[in-house]
Image (cartoon, helix red, strand yellow):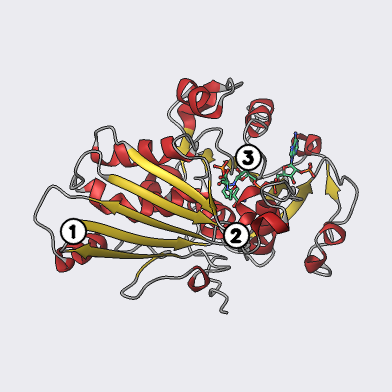
Amino acid sequence: MEGKKKYNIAIVGASGYTGSELARILVQHQKVEIKMITSETHTGKPFSELHPQFLGILDLPLESAEEVSKNQLDVVFLALPHGVSMEYIKKWKDKKAMMIDLSGDYRLSGPDVYKNWYKQDHVFPEAFDRAIYGLPELHENRIRGAQLVANPGCYPTASILSLAPLFKDQLIKEGSVVIDAKSGTSGAGVKASNTTHFSNVNDNFKAYGLRIHRHTIEIEEQLGNLQKEKAKIQFTPHLLPVDRGILATSYAQVNEEMSQKKLDEIYGEFYKGKPFVRLRSSIPALKDVRGSNYCDIMPIWDERTQRVIVLSVIDNLVKGAAGQAVHNMNLMLGIPQETGLLQSPMQP
Ligand SMILES: NC(=O)C1=CN([C@@H]2O[C@H](COP(=O)(O)OP(=O)(O)OC[C@H]3O[C@@H](n4cnc5c(N)ncnc54)[C@H](OP(=O)(O)O)[C@@H]3O)[C@@H](O)[C@H]2O)C=CC1
Ligand SMILES: CC(=O)N[C@@H](CCC(=O)OP(=O)(O)O)C(=O)O
């Protein structure tokens, strides 16, 4: 399908943060038309009543997700909590539409690993076989032919991209990787909680999920696949008193002679032709990528400690979620991969 044809899309869970970020990106995407947006809590309300920033831009009424099966859709985005997405993927298993799931329900290798880390049974394991992990820098060709894409988590996006070139070249010394990552509060979703309460976050900084955060296994599996051998990493997330952004600082030892020049060549080669990864020679900050689909990466060789340090920043709602989902959609539809995604970052 080419020319003026527009693809019909639905955003399921449009009342949430990633759902509304999908709307922000897709209203100005020339190749799609937002046919329906859903919410169970706000059914019937115009989208712009819930999200006033969309007044006059997207005033469509929110419908129940039950209505999805009645519509002719080309692409369905599921911006739902994990555990909920798989119920809908099961329900819509015979639907022709391409599906992009922003939750963690199909990111791992199978139902047993899922149960171990998500502490719940998987209700539709049959779909694991056809779910493709939607990190375009790693799996572009497989995403192009996919019908179901498991969009990566925000921490895994920043973390995997920070170390992928070294794992791909099998340069990592076993057991040496530590990833210390910090996220803004929108990573925790639209619902207020004790953790995201203003007084608990503002002027504060805290680690959480030590040793057991579910993103650990997602990162390990993807990096392990790259080096064709299981990977074990230490991953610690932290909550920053900002609304958007993730900064991951990754540390690793390597099993070969290294230098800054060699490191730059490895990263330059790996990310050649990847439009959304920018290799930096100055220290990247959250605001350098805010509101954009870029992942800025700075690899550093520390001659004194014989360690690689990699700084990686993304906007968790864009490259870490909605932007990456649109990138996946573009690949699945066979349209130019940058379509609708070239927003410049917002500074300050
Ligand atoms: N926030 C982030 O930075 C990132 C999030 N993700 C993942 O993306 C998904 C969405 O995240 P986010 O937008 O932050 O989450 P939110 O909590 O902000 O939104 C989730 C939405 O799902 C809807 N929902 C909840 N339960 C149900 C249900 N049983 N049936 C139908 N709809 C339901 C809710 O809408 P309503 O109650 O109106 O129906 C809600 O608006 C999650 O799986 C998250 O882990 C991934 C990467 C980054
Ligand atoms: C700040 C914050 O709370 N972040 C979330 C991660 C958001 C995300 O990407 O989660 P999924 O993998 O479930 O999609 C968390 O740590 O649980």
Foreground pick, 184 / 106: 184
Q: CA distance from mark 3 to mark 1?
A: 51 Å
**Residue found at x 67% / y 41%:** 80
Q: Is residue 122 left or right of residue 155?
A: right
Q: Which residue is mark 1?
A: 305
Q: CA distance from mark 2 to mark 1?
A: 31 Å
Q: Which residue is mark 3?
A: 97
Dot placed on the residue nearer the N-terminal end, 2 or 1: 2
What amino acid type should be assigned to the residue bearing mark 2?
A: Asn
Q: Is residue 6 visible?
A: no
Dot 3 beta carbon under 8 Å from ligand 1: no
Where's residue 181, x and y in %?
45, 53
Tell which tag, 2 or 1, sits nearer the viewer. Answer: 2
Where's residue 311, x and y in %?
36, 62
Mark 1 closeness class: few <14, some 14–19, many ≥20 residues within 10 Å: few
Q: Which quarter of the rendered picture does the C terminus lie within? A: bottom right
What amino acid type should be assigned to the residue bearing mark 1?
A: Thr
Foreground pick, 186 / 336: 186
* Label total for image: 3
**Residue found at x 53% / y 26%:** 127
Quadrant for residue 49, please give it.
bottom right
Ligand 1 - quadrant of the structure image:
top right
Mark 2 closeness class: few <14, some 14–19, many ≥20 residues within 10 Å: few
Where's residue 45, x and y in %?
90, 52
Dot placed on the residue nearer the N-terminal end, 3 or 1: 3
Where's residue 31, x and y in %?
61, 61
Q: Which mark is residue 204?
A: 2
Q: Is residue 146 left or right of residue 278?
A: right
Secondary element under disc 1, as helix, strand or loop, is loop
Give yes or no for contact between labels 2 and 3 (Cβ–Cβ under 8 Å). Answer: no
